[in-house]
Image: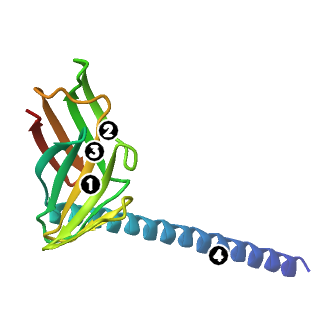
Amino acid sequence: MSTAVASVIASSVFFLVAIILVAVFGSVLMQYSNTLARLYEMRKQDLEISKAVVLIESVTYSNNCLLVSLANRGPSSLVVDGQTTILVDYTATTGERLVKILQHGISWLIEEVTVGSYRHLENPSAAELKPGAKAIIKMCLDPLPEISKPVVIVFVGRYGVRAEYVYTLS
């Protein structure tokens, strides 16, 4: 009888060890899979950064707002949306130097998108700039910039694509 009990106990311990090993192996496989997924996403972002080429072509001042002409000169599309950052460094009419991160939908929005000769008003919340496309971004600064001082505009896309432009109002 004690041999039978010892056999059952040994089988139970073996079964429990097997279950624990399967659970550990499954956990390791899940972590490996998650790590590969994160690496794939990081690589995808790196490729997007290397492909996109954005350029601020011009800036005009109209009705107390800056109209920024943004062009996609790269071989891949560029999304301009709430994850896009626009930074402005300027001297206000009060004489104070300001560096502001503008908020999408509040202090800047997409005015229009041009693809070839076709111009259309875009959804102000997001726009996809295909290769060769241009967008007009309307930025309203408060307080207003001093006319005789330069305004530095930095555009940064969601994957780190960036463009800079120095504009003097006068």
Check disc 4 and report its element: helix, strand or loop. helix
Position of residue 163 relative to residue 23, above or below, is: above
Is 165 placed left or right of 19 in the picture? left
In the visual, does 1 lie left or right of 140? right
User: Which amino acid, mark 2?
Assistant: Ile
Q: Position of residue 135 (x, y in %)?
A: 21, 60
Q: Provide the residue designation for mark 2.
A: 101
- Tell me the crowding category of disc 2: few under 14, some 14 to 19, or many 20 or more residues within 10 angstroms, Cα based: few
> Residue at left 57%, top 68%?
24
Secondary structure of the residue carrying numbered label 3: strand
The residue mark sitting in front, 2 or 3, is 3
Residues at marks 4 and 2, CA–CA distance in whole angstroms: 57 Å
Which residue position is annotated with label 4? 18
The span from disc 3 to disc 1 (Cα, nearest Å) is 16 Å
**Residue 144 point in image, percent of width and height:** 26, 30
Please state which amino acid type lies under the numbered disc 4: Ala
Please tell me whether mark 1 sits on a helix, a strand or a loop: loop
The answer to which of marks 3 and 1 sits earlier in the sequence is 3
Number of marks: 4
Residue 105 seen from this side: yes
Disc 2 or disc 1, which is closer to the eye? Answer: 2
Task: Find the residue positioned furthest to the top.
Answer: 95
Is residue 69 found left or right of 78 in the rendered image? left
Q: Which residue is mark 3?
A: 139
Indicate the quadrant containing the N terminus: top left, top right, bottom left or bottom right. bottom right
Q: Which residue in the protein does label 1 denote?
A: 157
Mark 3 residue crowding within 10 angstroms, few (<14) / some (14–19) / many (20+): many
